[in-house]
Amino acid sequence: MRTALGLTSLCLFVVLCTPLQAQITFQRTYGGADTDLGGWVQPTADSGYIMSGYTASFGAGGYDGWLVKTDARGDTVWTKTYGGTNRDELWTVGKTTDGGFILAGTTYSFGAGDADVWLIRVDAHGETLWTRTYGSPDGEWGYFATQTSDGGYIVTGTTTDVVQPSRGYYLVKTDSAGDTLWTRTSGSSSNGEYIYMAAETFDGGFVFIGYWQVWTPNGHGDVHLVKTDMNGDTLWTRSWGGASETDVGYTVVQCADSGFFITGMSGSFSPYHGIYLIRTDEHGDTLWTRPFPQSMFGEQGRSGMPTDDGGYIIAGSDEGPAQTLVLLKVDASGNPLWKRNYEGSTGPGQDAGIHARQSLDGGYIVSGYTNSAGAGRHDAWLIKTDSEGNVAVAEREPAVVREANPATLVRGVLMVPRDMTELPGNSDRVPRPTLLDAIGRKVLDLQPGASDIRALAPGVYFVRQPAAATKIVIQH
């Protein structure tokens, strides 16, 4: 098989000098021709960002778990996919104490059942250190994981290993290697019980947020908060909501006064669902609630995180025929300071914010997905704003993400185009490319045209040009 190696394009970068206190803003999409969705986002120590999600454009099968690392301006540093030939999803990414990351989601490719809770531990470059699945033959779905103070992890999910047709919550505590220390489920409840997020509390226990669905003719659910000890045994529970509509809690964080801040959505306080904020004391008793039934079609608050000024930043979406991503900033009492809606360059579409956090420069980073911008049906979306939620320049051209350092597969003969040995636009000669092995040793001087590589051992090599290197994989 004769495989031609294309010319690697060279890019010219212009550095703009800005004051050190300036806040970078951007909108970026990531993905290919199919559906690609963003999950959670975390700022990284190098002032860049790491975003979880799942992709149908890249990877091994249907959907694959996906990790995108960017620099401070949202430009892709690398991407990784994780999964098998079936559907695999990653929802959240959390930082670990050694500079790596913990990823949580659901896998249909691995594990004991049709679906299993999926945990992946990776290093700072996204390389897999270990993976674990948790579940029974009945099916479990994973939503969230975070590292705990003992170096292990707390993982949340949902199980069908309960009385049908309901689902129950599924909690797993692991050691530092991902091995199970204990699990907790809702047992034989006849209600649907969902847990979306967990937080370790100052007393060494845990708090879990989700909703309890009550099986009635109308059907409804309440925001539900569960406090446990360090062994996962329940200390108390609290619920909020109305009598006949669905109210859901998505995220919970413990505040400096040991109380809790909850973000979700509520259908109980207006004809439409609205963002729903709840603040409690350390015992889970209500200090205040703030429903936001402001949109004609309703809103969802998918995550809420604390900010340096004592308030909170909330990411979500305005629901409706034209759905937009929403960023809401509130003060310490839940009073709105500002609200911003974002849509892609092609106008209203189906856009949503999944997670937001304060960035290192005092602005905000928001992750989610869009079909009003980008390259495919849906694309993962990162928006970096200033401290007031403003974005100076919207992205107009789709930024298509390719696999990090993609390799060209070569068998037998390596074709070197003549333009790799000439400067574009003139006949001046430049140093000929060379073939290097995986540790940088020169293996072969390459000539224009065909180079016989059948005598070389299979493996990874690099074609070095004067200003770039292209990765290839030789097979026989």
Image: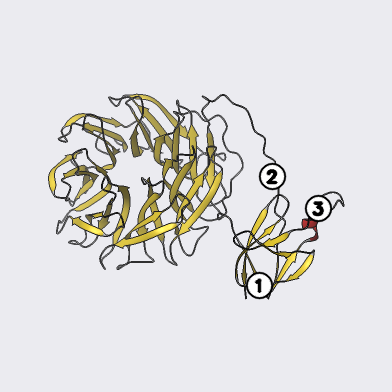
Examine the image and state in which quarter residue 458 appears: bottom right
Label 3 – label 2 distance at C-alpha: 18 Å
Q: In whole angstroms, how far apart are the C-alphas of marks 1 and 3?
A: 26 Å
Q: Which of marks 3 and 2 is nearer the N terminus?
A: 2
- Disc 3 marks a residue whose amino acid type is Val
- Which residue in the protein does label 2 denote? 11
- Asked whether residue 148 appears in the rendered view, the answer is yes
Q: Can residue 318 be seen in this view?
A: no
Q: Which mark is residue 456?
A: 1
Residue in the image at 78% along x and 58% along y: 432
User: Rounded to the nearest whole Å, what is the CA distance between mark 1 and mark 2?
Assistant: 32 Å
Specify the quadrant of the image occupied by residue 5. bottom right
Mark 3 = which residue? 430
Depth order, front residue of 193/405: 405
The x and y percentages for residue 329 are: 38, 28
* Element type at mark 3: loop
Mark 3 residue crowding within 10 angstroms, few (<14) / some (14–19) / many (20+)? few
The three-letter amino acid code for the residue at tag 1 is Leu
* Relative side of 44 to 27, left or right: left
Mark 2 Cα-neighbour bin, 10 Å: few <14, some 14–19, many ≥20: few
Disc 1 residue crowd, few under 14, some 14–19, many 20+, Cα 10 Å: some
Which of the two discs, 1 and 2, labels the residue nearer the N terminus? 2
Which residue is drawn at the image coordinates 82% and 54% (left, top)?
422
Regarding mark 1 in the picture, which secondary structure is present there? loop
Choose mark 1 or mark 2, whichever is in front: 1
